Image (cartoon, rainbow, N blue to C red):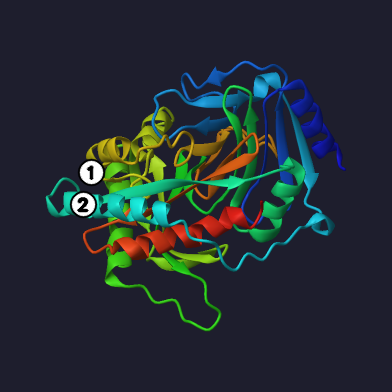
Amino acid sequence: MTDLFLKIKTQQEQNLPYVIFCKPNSDKIVGLFQRNDHLYFLENFEEKGFVFAPFDANDFPFIPLEYSDVFVENVNSKDFFVSNVTSVSENLEAKNDFENLVTKGIHAIKNNQFQKVVLSRKEEILVTDFDAEITFKRLLSNYPTAFKYCFFHPKIGTWLGATPEQLLQTKGNALKTVALAGTQLHNENKKVVWQEKEKNEQQLVTDFIVNGLEDLVKEITISSPYSVKAGNIWHIKTDISATAKNKNAFQKIIKALHPTSAVCGLPKDVAKAFILENENYEREYYAGFLGEMNIDLITFKLQKTDLFVNLRCMKIEEKKANLYIGCGITEDSIPENEYIETINKSMTMKKVI
């Protein structure tokens, strides 16, 4: 066991907050270990540390660098644990509930309540012997191109994930973000072809981001959509870059982007209200965002923020894992197909537990 994972054991024994993470395509694992158990919140978005923000709240918890120790280690390929989950069992009640929810969302779209809504469900999996080190190493093995993390706070709980979606990356006044939508299960023998439903959904996400940023930035550049693989899933991705009009704009930019239409819907406020009223469970930190605020914890360079949307994630509670999975609904959605999409996405976490 390395120094970093020994430190995790110590933090767990003392019930102290910590986060370990590995960025997409990185060979470094970073650990931030808080020296007390206080729950801190961002106040002016100029703080340095690691933020872990919920889907629906105005307060954003974070682990402050000021009260924490930093560990950085190289990824050791000898420690990799690869799992091959090829199929998952279906729960008929969960299937019916989710398809009914999707049907309700489609009706709301056809009644012009909103253009798109992202609906999700929670699935409970029995976990008899959870081990943070083994599970995190499985994330590293299976999802090199994702943002992998394990976060713990005694007042929040234990969360893990491998998210493919960047919320915001900044360096000085320069910023980058992405529009991510569409889902297709990877098939070695099949070419990736996107239907109009997925293309339209992707365009809605791109338009939401651009419209939200236009008063806060200048020099917006938008790439052509392209296919990108995340684990066993393909998505459509568009890269967006811009320059903030001033250094004080980032708090407004983050709040303009979060929650993104890729996890909420369009228009955002109406879609969010529908989600909170109809999903019948609490998303908590699923579909929130997380990452480094105002510092690169490997190089310690300032004015660098690297945030990701908290997708493909789970919360560990006693002897169970709560998996959170969702999909974008438009008027062309087919409820059964959307449920199958959540099944495909659930394999991201089922591969590591």
**Residue type (three-letter) at the residue carrying disc 1:** Pro
| Horizontal and vertical percent position of residue 76 | 81, 54
Horizontal side of residue 123 vs 94, given as left or right: right
**Nearest to N terminus: mark 1 or mark 2:** 2
The reply to whether residue 6 is in sight is: yes
Determine the residue located farthest toward the bottom in the rendered image: 189
The reply to whether residue 179 is in sight is: no
| Horizontal and vertical percent position of residue 28 | 73, 48
How crowded pointer 1 is (Cα within 10 Å; few <14, some 14-19, many 20+) is rated as some
Q: Residue at x 21, y 59 (%)?
A: 331
Label 1 with label 2: CB-CB less than 8 Å: yes
| Horizontal and vertical percent position of residue 92 | 42, 57
Instruction: Locate the N terminus by quadrant.
Output: top right
Name the secondary structure under disc 1: loop
What residue would you read off at disc 2?
Answer: 115
Determine the residue located farthest toward the front in the rendered image: 93
What residue would you read off at disc 1?
Answer: 267
Rendered position, 271 above or below 293: below
Q: Which residue is at the front of the view, 57 or 175?
A: 57
Q: Which residue is at the front of the view, 13 or 205?
A: 13
Horizontal side of residue 171 vs 72, given as left or right: left
Rendered position, 223 above or below 6: below
How crowded pointer 2 is (Cα within 10 Å; few <14, some 14-19, many 20+) is rated as many
**Residue type (three-letter) at the residue carrying disc 2:** Gln
Name the secondary structure under disc 2: loop
Q: Residue at x 84, y 35 (%)?
A: 6
Q: Which residue is at the front of the view, 313 or 242?
A: 313
| Horizontal and vertical percent position of residue 204 | 28, 55
